Image: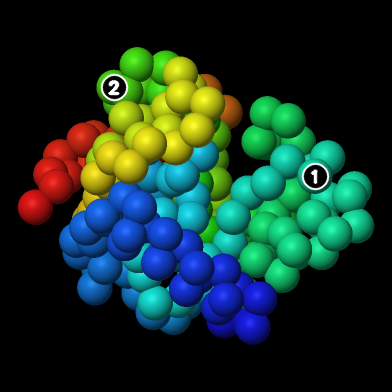
Amino acid sequence: MNLSYRIGWHCFRAMYATYFRWRVFGAENVPLKGGVILASNHGSFLDPPLVGSGIKRDINYLARESLFRFPGIGALLRSWNSVPVDRDGGGAKGLKTILDRLLQGNGIILFPEGTRTKDGKLQPARSGIGLTVIKSTAPVVPVRVFGTFEAYGRHHKFPRPHRVAVKYGKPMNFEALRAEAKTCDKARLKIIYQQVADEIMAAIAKLEPK
């Protein structure tokens, strides 16, 4: 961790411990070194720092490319290992940056659902994360956050002091599907992307807060 990231990491941990009375489960499932994808459900803006604060290694985050245009904010985001992506969170440029960082041995947080839930329930996974997983060689750690929708969901203007938790599952590997994807046709490839996304979402759904 660089100095800026470490300061932010400690500050977020203090906030989650005091204001949100957080609980962390399964942090030992996240490799301390090497490329890894943390795939989490998405209930709130609280989720990215929550997922990153629960483990003792630095993680890369996705941030809208437009935010990097502001000198102060852009510098801070870069120091926190943020990856610039377009409004929809995709695009070839963003994907290449994500894959490059994974190849360099970094971890990154992705949200299979693509956007924050509107009702607190888990949403279907989008195929985008499947594409990223197949094109990388990194293991995938399913992550589930609890209470963040109630604390700071779409319907809240300010975070409430509601208890939150984060649980990290066992790493998932997709060697067989990665191997098949190298030789299959485009139609099958699209099916593989969605299959990977669905399997990750199913693993997230199985995680319980204990």
Q: Is residue 76 left or right of residue 135?
A: right
Which residue does the image show at 46% across and 18% down from the upper left?
Answer: 155
Residue 145 on image: x %, y %: 30, 44
Kind of residue sitting beneath label 2? Lys
Q: CA distance from mark 2 to mark 1?
A: 29 Å
Q: Is residue 25 left or right of residue 129?
A: left
In primary-sequence order, the first of circles 2 and 1 is: 1
In the displayed structure, 68 sits above or below 158; it is below
Kind of residue sitting beneath label 1? Leu
Residue 43 on image: x %, y %: 39, 32
Q: Is residue 126 left or right of residue 26?
A: right
- The scheme the figure's colours follow is rainbow
Which residue does the image show at 31% across and 62% down from the upper left?
Answer: 17
Which residue does the image show at 14% across and 47% down from the upper left?
Answer: 209
Helix, strand or loop status at disc 2: loop
Residue 113 on image: x %, y %: 44, 29
Report if residue 173 is visible in the image: no
Judging by the rendered image, the residue that carries numbered circle 2 is 121
In the displayed structure, 104 sits above or below 67; it is below
Judging by the rendered image, the residue that carries numbered circle 1 is 67
In the displayed structure, 112 sits above or below 19; it is above
Helix, strand or loop status at disc 1: helix
Could you say which disc has been placed on residue 39 in the image? none
**Front residue (pair 55, 162):** 162
Which residue does the image show at 40% across and 66% down from the upper left?
Answer: 13
Report if residue 47 is visible in the image: yes
